[in-house]
Image: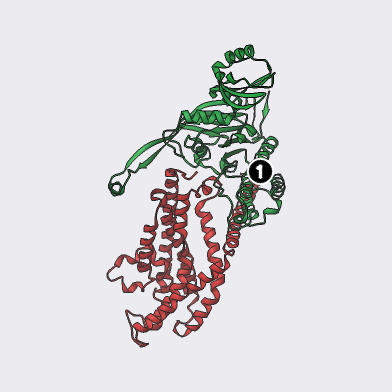
Amino acid sequence: MNDSSAAATADSFRDTMIRHLRLRWLILRTAVEERLVYRGDFAFATLVRFLPIVTQIFLWGAIFSGDSTRTLQSYRYADMVAYFLLVMVARAFSSMPGLASGIAESIRSGSVRKYLLQPVDMLDYLLWHRVAHKLVYYAVAVGPFTLVFWLCRSWLPGWPSADVMAAFIVSLLFGFAIGFLIESLIGLIAFWFLEVSSLIFIYMMLNFFLSGHMIPLEWIDGWIPWVHVLPLKYLAYFPAAVLLGKIPPDDLPRELAIQAVWIVILLAACRLAFHRGVRRYGAFGG
Amino acid sequence: MPVQGRTGLTTMRRMPIIDVQNLSRTYHVYRKREGLLASFRGLFHREYRAVHAVRDVSFRIEEGEMVAFLGPNGAGKTTTLKLLSGLIEPTSGSAVVMGHIPWKRENAYRRRFSLVTGQKEQLWWDLPAQESFRLHKEIYRIDDSDYRRRLDELTGLMEVQDLISQPVRELSLGERMRMELIAALLHRPDVLFLDEPTIGLDVVSQRRVQQFLRTYQAEQRITVILTSHYMKDIEALCDRAVVINRGRVIHDGPVSEIGDRFGRHKIVELHFADGLVPRDVEQFGLVLENRAPMVRLQIPRQDVSEALSRMLARYAVDDVSVSERPLEDVIAELFAAETPEVPHE
């Protein structure tokens, strides 16, 4: 390859990248605009999501009977409060309200055809749509989050080291990807079953128990040892455990690598489900 | 003589832009028997039956043609359009559109066609249409200047310049349809599939969409396949019609030939010289209109010559004309005679 053709290839590659970025930026921007339309409902829903943490704090206060020295499975009351606050942060990244049911509905109603007719990738499109939802959510929730953390500051551990903080942030972003891909996969199953609400219910239930949303996983891994093999733990437990120092620093790279492997596996499963599903698709509905 | 097409192909002989050969699509549909007990049985054992939505359909369309697909509900029109736009895969047969196999869904193909259905789903419901248009610009990689020019042109033709900044959900059905058409045409597709584009629209909106399509197609020379139940759409826009029934092509030719081929009756209009309509005129055919001195009769096609010669010999007639029945009536009669086995689209 001579210099001029190499330069042309580099230019073309750069142009393609710029086009890709512009498209994603526009999807993101349009989705943010859409999200801001129903501002009343959105603000209310965002604030209401803080109520469970208040309940949790009181519930665990009652369980520990106000005894700050008492320990349950290596967790003191302060650890429990800190754990649930961090789980709340993790779930702010990994929970995907309406994603699976939305995909299933679009398959059932036929509106999924938009992704088949236009030169776009459905998962890519939905990903940026979801990123927009999350960004708007964080923008609104940052105030209440800060307030809750400030009010609970006495129960929180000190600032972590830079390495642990970096691992925490990466685990949150990977948790977002895992949550997105699992829900997308469940939604795509609608290509076969059309109705997946029972599947979503089962997933929510398993997620609640096996992600560490209900209780720390150390409390159940005695009788469910395989809980650490599942990707669900990265949705809630893992980021919290990283920041609370429950994961030895030497294990962090390995754990993050496993999380990345899960992303690759789930992405491949979603691609396969979409590819196979579209072949089955009857495009009913007009 | 070389022919330069819109797609940039220069050929000695015109190549079809759409080439469909023996295309078939069969669905397997769950057959539920009536009643609660049957519902429980269906949990363990389900009966399926094959529905042949499209059977052995073949046709070719040249670049720049505007072709109507006619047929009753469940005839296979929409399924054919779904196959050509790559939404579904065929059970057998082949289709090549602009050199692409549609169901491979290559981006290079998807950038060159549009499908507009009555479902109207390209636009973001809660946002003004201009936001969706801007997203289309990026999805279809339209240059800034082209985008601006085409948007101005299309919104001007559609008379919706003032509406593109209004949330889509606040637009009327006709306005939304026009926005959908703009979204579908912004990237200047070479092939446009229109599935019932005027369904549910009032007469004014129907006419506006018709007018727009006629002007746009004449200017841009794009290839259009149009399905519609409104024969006025078809007569106003298309020269050629492919009539499909029970998944099969039963006519492929000029729209004007449909009456000749399938119309079992003709309309004969007579103006009588003495200003009165004779009472016994009804012996020659069915009286559709009796407004002295004029009468309109519906006469079986094969009897027209004989009836005319007898009437002209018997009555003093000032003026006579023979015409085909309205296309709508011919099509309705044709499809009523050949009702589909299973409505399915």
Residue B254, can we see it? no
Residue A249 lies in quadrant: bottom left
Q: Is residue A284 left or right of residue B132?
A: left
Observer-nearest residue: B308 or A161?
Answer: B308
Residue at x 63%, y 56% (from the top left corner): B128
Residue A61's x, y, as percent?
A: 38, 83
Residue B111's x, y, as percent?
A: 59, 43
Residue B101's x, y, as percent?
A: 52, 36
Observer-nearest residue: A108 or B143?
Answer: A108
Q: Residues within 10 Å of mark 1 (few under 14, many from 20)?
A: few
Colour of chain A in the image: red
Q: Is residue A95 left or right of residue B17?
A: left
Residue A228 lies in quadrant: bottom left
Relative to B31, say whether B19 is above or below.
above
Q: Secondary structure at mark 1?
A: helix
Relative to B191, say whether B12 is above or below.
above
Observer-nearest residue: A160 or A235?
Answer: A235
- Chain letter of the green region: B
Residue A264, can we see it? yes
Q: Quadrant of the N terminus of chain A?
A: top right
What chain does mark 1 sit on? Answer: B
Residue at x 43%, y 52% (from the top left corner): A188
Which scheme is used to colour this image of the protein?
by chain
Residue A163's x, y, as percent?
A: 48, 73
